[in-house]
Image (spheres, coloured by chain):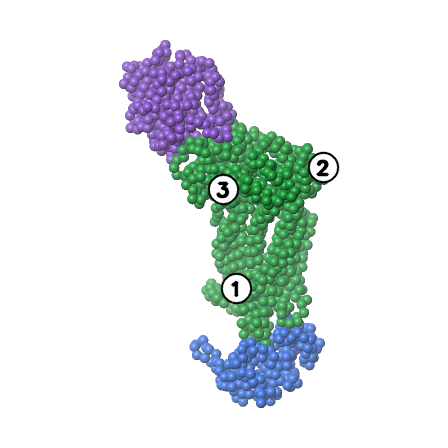
Amino acid sequence: MIGYFCKALGAHLRRGRSLLLLTVLGVALGVASVLSIQIINLNALAAFEGSMQAVSGDADLSVLGRMPALPESLYVDVLAEPGVQSAWPLVRVRAVLDGHEDFFLDIVGVDFFAPVRVPWQGDPVDFSQPLGQSGWAAFTPQLAAKMGWRIGDAVTVSKGSQRLPLRVGALVDFQRLTPLASPKLVLMDIAQAQHLLGRKGWVQQIDVVVAEGADVDLVRQRLQARLGAAVQVLTPAQRTRQTAGLLAAFRLNLTALSLISLFVGLFLIYTSTQASLVRRRAEFGMLRSLGATRGQLFALIVGEVVLLGALGVLAGLPLGYWAAQANVERVSATLTNLYLLDEISTLKLPPWLFGLAALSGIGGALAGALIPALDMSRRNARALLSDFTLHEKIGSLAPQLGALGTTVLILTGGWYTWLGRTWQPAGFVLAIAILSALPLLTPLAIRTLTGWIAVRGFGLGYSLKSLGARLQNSALAVASLAIAVSMLLGITLMVGSFRQTLQVWIRTTVQADIYIAPLAWRGQGDEAFLAPDLVRALRLFPGVQAMDRLRGFVAYADEQRVALAGVDIGLPGGSSRFALLAGTPQRVYREVRENGAVLIGETLARRRNLWPGDSLDLYTPAGRQSFAIAGVYYDYSPQGGAVIMDLQTLTAHWGEAGLNSVALYLEPDRDAEVVVDALRAAFADAAIEIRSNRRLRQEAFAIFDQTFAITRLLQGISLLIAVCGIALMLLVQAREQVSELALYRAVGATRTQLFGFFIGKGMGMGLLGLLLGAGGGILLALILVFVINRAYFGWTIQLYWPWQAIVQQVLIILLGAVAASLYPALKASKTPAMELRREDV
Amino acid sequence: MTRALTFENVSKTYALASGGSKYALRSVSFGVSPGRKVAIVGRSGSGKSTLLHLAAGIDGPSSGTVRVLERDFNTLSEGERTRMRRDEIGLIFQFFHLLPLLSVRDNVRLPAMIAGDRGSAARSRAEELLERVGLADRLDDAVQQLSGGEMQRVAICRALLRRPRLLLADEPTGNLDDENGRRVMELLLALTADEGATLIYVTHSRDFASQADAVWEIHSGELQI
Amino acid sequence: MKMFEGALSERQPMHPRTTITRACNLLVALAACCLLPALAGAQNWRIAQPDYAWSFPRDHWARSNYKTEWWYFTGHLDAADGRRFGYQFTFFRVGLSPEKPDLDSAWATSELIMGHAAISDLAQKQHYFAEVLYRTTPLLGGFATYPDTLIAWSRGPAGTPEHWTLSWNGSGFDFAMADQGQGIAFALHTVPQKPLIFQGPNGYSRKGAGASAASHYYSFTRLRTTGVLKVGGKTAAVSGDSWMDKEFGTNQLGEHQVGWDWFSLQLADGREIMLYILRDTAGRVDYGRATLVAADGTTRFLKRESLALRTTKKWTSPQTKATYPAGWELNVDGETFLLTAEMADQENRSALGRPLFYWEGAVRVSDGKGRQLGKGYVELTGYGTGNRPGI
């Protein structure tokens, strides 16, 4: 049997090269999308861990603030705690490399005389220099090599609105400690760091080594008790868990999308297996009649599929790696922008990841082949050799399958209504139910739809009718396309609605004429300040009527990170800056201005069920403080919670620090663009970004689009797989329908007509897929917008129809379908009329 | 005088795997006048079907000339041959070759659909033909529901739909029992006569052959008139 | 003489030679690399001069113009329950630059404070060593100025809430240390039994032939000491005698000097002897000086020719594998003394940074017939092949 397997397989594969190619491609694309997403997911966290290890590798505990910075006096308290073996403070800030947009350096200020481990490279460091030489900083050899820096070279970075002149003082190779360390780590003396950053007295972190024999957790608890609630004392594992928690929704989203690609790929495998089995039916019948057992037949089929799956995996692994690499920057930018996390600079590839991808490819192939293989091996020889065709089977099963699909939908809907509402991932269950009901409903839908068509001529209608007659084949191709379309449409609708909602929101809230913030402020984080002199100069700039100031940072409401911002709430017209969801504007703003109350974002309100009249506890340097909630406003920040208070209230609790951005209101009849130009000329030296209202809006959307870029890529992959499915199906039909095609030729159909017939079939599948996918997509969009988004982000998104995008995508899908049918159509058109055979038609 | 079909020194050879070639037809020449009915008899593999395929322009000769209605197939493009087949030739097969996705009426209408003729004339012509073969009450049925004889009657209607001048039938009764075969043969001959078409049919049956104006026998690719 | 290093200025950190100084070693170790070069403002540091104008009590406080300075206390203490202890307490001032960098940060500093403390529990034969090293900032430690009573202070080692302090009590010094990790602490009060003496003429103590090879050096050779001492979690009242050295200078040591042996002996007849020898790379005695303090406090400075030192016993540290002298026959100006270590392992092994170790321990002084003549402290540095930067 093995000998037969090899011979038959060889012959079979030679005969159906394009079929083979498509099957392999399907597996490859599925595997690639899973692999690339897992690589990116894993490395998002690994990047954080790498930097953590490089900077705090020796530490058992890290003391971190529930506010942007810790008073350095806490270091003394840490030192005094029994059980502490050693401890050292760290100043950590992110700065932007001059001339490189969004190129962030992770500056770490250390006390070189504390027992820190520094992996110096090259000549020994002269320790008078880190302290005594202005701007002395140690860079990684990787970065120095990339930038062509040598020791002694000057490097300018900007932090907040300030430009800082640094000097390459030494090289420090963190990758020797941990291979995933970011090459963008920069080491400075703590005194220089505080001085340059204007943050005397503040540090970001204190690392602690616990004495041998002491109980780490006990020391952690005692430290926590000693230092108070304004800080958190965390083990490295806890820090990783926190970051993982922060990224959970983001990673879940990507994983779900990549699984859909695999799911669609699975259909492709199923279809091609089915096709090859149908074609070889007589061969199998003959084998069975010659005495081959069911087991042997099953093994024959499964063996072939595994081989194809393996080929797909082989192609998919490098493809996935490549895709990950090609997209890592995009994802990395998202991580930096949204979560202020470390950039992914090196991809770590544990072998198990490849194992997982291989398993999903071959397993997927097997799962796809199992039912057809079982079905085929269960038949007896006579049935296989007889005229009976499989075509009818799905046709006759269509009502039952449809009923099953409907049941799935009803049951899931019922489950959600009665039980699932409170469960966070419930939305994903709903989405899965829709995506699995869709293929079940497809045969019935096709049969019903094509049944309505009265055939007039040999055109599109005829092609559609022909699809209905070949349900077994077409249902699969249409179903996989429908799934891809649902996903595409669902996400397009969601993203489009979100974008439109955001647009409306921005229009009401972004009202100042000019916005000024440090370069790459979002990526720099909480400590990017505008210099006080600069702020004064801006306020007095000709044409400026009023200035709105903002200071924002990540604060903690219990264990939850919230984006806290202080603004000039009393500014005239300021009341329209926040679109209120709950609370009456007049009262709300008075409360906030006069009584130190806060406004909270919708996300936070929903998640914590907090509404006006409740209070919110925030950690301040003095410990936990309660703030009255005056109102709830629409908020679309990604951090999962936002809190606004008056700048004065903020300063009163968190102390003086710089401003993160200011907004200028111009005198009436001033042209914003002209003032922007004047400001740029006047403050050419400051590392600031001056944006007009229009620019700011544009940039907001650029960031928005960037966030969804990876999503679009995955949509594309699924669609590509689905289009491959169409090509595959048509190829199969061109082969199977030889007699029918020959008949058309015999009764006078030209080659062009047959070509058109097949293009029509492709279009038909595209249309049916679109029609079914539209249903699924709308449902999916509703789930995304109203269930998943609510559960994970808590934004209010109004449903909008991004018609332009939808029409564009419909055209792309139809074009794709047509493109996919070109080759099969060409093959079909070459069918000779002589091919009329006894057993067909 | 115009001839419906002319073969001049037509030979057809097939290459063999061993390297040589085999004659399916050897220097066949004949002419058939319009309105004539010719039966072709011969054993299996004698070349009967090849002759019909050549006459229909489905296949081309290795040498010699095939003319239908005085038009030389050698001088026509593939497309022109196809259109000749669509408009001037009707084909009837042993195994009916009806399409399960179409109703009885639409199966008959298929040549008109392919010709792009969507008018109601084709539709009423199909219905009229079906009435003449006694299937007026089965217009909307699925073809799978028909008996063999009924299927072949539908196939005959399909062949006649576009009023072809030349009808080619390849063992039209070969898949039917005697009774059904006789009825189908009667209908075929009668309808051909009504339409004034020329009919060339292949048959195994001496009985059916005898109903033709002429009976030609093919033997190992050579035609004996 | 507890010598701090001029080699701070030398750009040869990798060379075994530089191991002679503990500060250098420690810094090298911490930084895992080289130290402050001669260029780093060395020309701005003041060099020890023979005609230095002493001013007491002001000169008990830090002399920040000099690069290196230390206050060194060693002594023997007896507890009420009969237990005997040797102890060491030292604050070093390690100058980084003559000027404080102009940075807006508490961490900006021109010097480090380093503390070493040890207790030798002579009955239990247990030696404890504790250390601190901080840059001087208001948070972590620093040096005060006259007339403040405080001279120097620092945070305790990590895990210890208590500070380490040194202050002037009007006639002598009070000092305290603690290390919770090791369960040791002491707080001692000293009163001079004999007046302050200069080591070398006008306190100008030469260490070699070079121009800068000298330091300013004075001692209290007999301080009546009382206080409390904690070992193994048990606190006891203690009393005994201490010896105090204060020394400051810049770049005292020559390049070829690898280490030294230093002795402070308090004889039962009321006399004291201070003696040091500097060893060169070949292990030969390169330089040596001694001071003989009479019972009435008058001093005699002896050159090398009047001194003879012979090792009678050796001890190898199981931890560092360094082999130290453990017994000596000492001849000073015709008088012979036998010196024996009170216990073998009185090695100070620093854990801050890379390995740095030296022997600093209590010794007994006797004559040829086994009669005890007095007690003393010995410091041995630069022994052991591993006693150099590991990089």
- Helix, strand or loop at disc 1? helix
Separation (CA) of disc 3 from disc 2: 45 Å
* Amino acid at pointer 1: Leu
Provide the residue designation for mark 3. Answer: A97
Chain A rendered in what hue?
green
Residue at image point 54% right, 62% down:
A273
Q: Chain of mark 1?
A: A
- Per the rendering, the mark at residue A64 is none
Does residue A684 appear anywhere in the picture? yes
Badge 2 and badge 1 both on one subunit:
yes
Residue receiving disc 2: A587
Specify whether disc 3 shares its chain with disc 2.
yes
Q: Is residue B140 left or right of residue A45?
A: right
The answer to whether marks 3 and 2 mark residues whose Cβ atoms lie closer than 8 Å is: no
Q: Which residue is mark 1?
A: A19
Answer with left or right where residue C173 lies relative to residue A744.
Answer: left
Q: How dense is the environment of label 3, judged by Cα within 10 Å: few (below 14), some, or many (20 and up)?
A: some
Q: Colour of chain C?
A: purple
Give residue C8's position: percent from left, percent from top: 38, 28
**Residue B35 at what x, y percent from top left?**
61, 87
How far apart marks 2 and 1 lie (CA) works out to: 70 Å
Residue C238: image quadrant is top left
Q: Which chain is blue?
A: B
- Give A762 or B173, whichever is nearer the viewer: A762
Percent coordinates x, y for residue C277 in the rendering: 32, 22
Quarter of the image for the C terminus of chain A: give it. Answer: bottom right
Labels 3 and 2: the sequence-earlier one? 3
